[in-house]
Image (cartoon, rainbow, N blue to C red):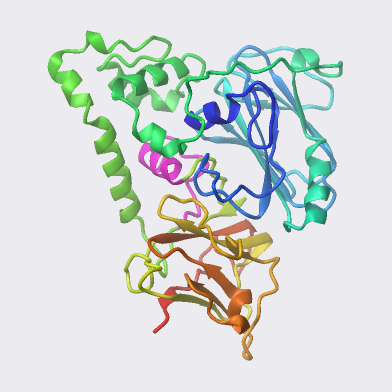
Amino acid sequence: MRSYRQQTNVAEPDAEHAPMGQMIRMRSYPAVDNHCCAAPNADTLYTEAWLDVSAEPAILSIPDMGDRYYIAPLLDGWSEVIAVAGTYTTGGEAQTYAITGPGWSGPLPKGATQVKSPTGLVWLLGRIYSTGTPEDYQAVHALQDQFAVVPLSAYGKPYTPPPGNVDRGFDMKTAVRKQVNALDIDDYFKRLAELMKTNPPTVQDAPMVERMARIGLVPGQAFDPEKLGFLDREAIRMVPKLALLEMGLHLKEQKTTNGWLYFTKGVGNFGTDYLTRGMANLLGPGWNRPGDAVYPLSQKDASGDEYDGERHKYMVRFEKGKLPPADAFWSLTMYDGDFFFVPNAIDRYDLAQRDRLVANADGSVEFYLQAESPGKDKEANWLPAPKGKFQLVMRIYAPKQSAPSILDGTWTPPPVTRVP
């Protein structure tokens, strides 16, 4: 929820923010010093909106996207994907969606597809593919400008959104993860209790809701830590540290393939797998369903050691015809230890399908992951690393549904090895 507060705590929209209920149209890849949300990509222009549909539905209009790849998932307040508009889900033609909140009923605009959200808070996390050139940016900007969201009562009428309410005391610069990790447990539970008033748990959450009630955390009610006994108050102070430790251990326990961790089911719709939900959002919020995108993560090399750009150089080799199988696009992004872009002299943050990669004589393609240039003849395939810890995220958007496919295991990411 800190992400939404940081992105909406403005009076008027700008390149990276907009008040609740208004479009955020990022005009370029995220800047290298943008630490709003972890694990950003350098392949698409984010086109987003945070919506409050607790009192009134929102009407989302998506223009005719032609053959331009895009994906526009809608996530509820618990980070569950509740609907996906996109090139490979609903097609590229113009579309209209009516996003309704819990318990809402009533007439909707003709031709609008209803999306029933179980929570009052909804996040539109749209991504539109761009090659990153000035000309292509301009083409994507024209499409972004046609995305629109308005309250149901304003649909089809002239509408000027009201200015947003700005909390001057809210931290707009510190990375969201750091802010959440630094929260006092009482403040955390108070905020959670407040959010659950309009973002109720599901029926499947009943056992967890019953457990939460033992410490006075009840949906629809304010949380009062003063009602807890001394021992209980002292015990819950350890919750944040223990939770972070548990999520970290859960990440380490996940099975890897050639040093890559990825999910081909279960993410995007976590259900009651609270630990995986927490772990995934710790890495970065806004996960897609695996059928829409798969994100292999590598934090260790083929030898099982953490990446160290100060001491080592690395290489990943794709055999002929074995580049990531995607119907839309693929990329490999370099991040620092906190999942942010790595500043470098050539302003390159990923290697991608759009790049003019140089193949070897046998058709294989090698990527060089290191702090210093591998030489002019290899720089086309160079992904600059920091002189320290780093991690890698591969993106496979619209992964192929048939072999070779990461979804059925007929394709797997190759290992990352040290260069002697």
Expressed as whole percent of the image width and height from the top left, the position of residue 82 reads 60, 34
Decide if residue 265 is on the left or right side of residue 132. left
Q: Nearer the viewer, residue 221 or 140?
A: 140
Residue 297, visible in the rendered structure: no
Looking at the picture, does residue 131 appear above or below residue 308? above
Kindly indicate the quadrant of the structure image that contains residue 27. top right
In this view, 71 is above or below 174: below
Q: Which residues are magenta?
A: 262-283
Q: Quick one: quadrant of the C terminus?
A: bottom left
Q: Position of residue 198 (x, y in %)?
A: 52, 16
Residue 333 position, x and y percent, is 55, 60
- Image x and y of residue 69, in percent: 75, 52
Q: Is residue 405 left or right of residue 58?
A: left
Which residue is the extreme one toward the bottom? Answer: 361
Closer to the camera, 237 or 264?
237
Residue lying furthest left = 231
Dividing the picture into quadrants, the one containing residue 228 is top left
Q: In the rendered view, does 228 fall on the left or right side of 13?
A: left
- Whether 81 is among the magenta residues is no
How many circles with numbers are drawn on the protein?
A: 0
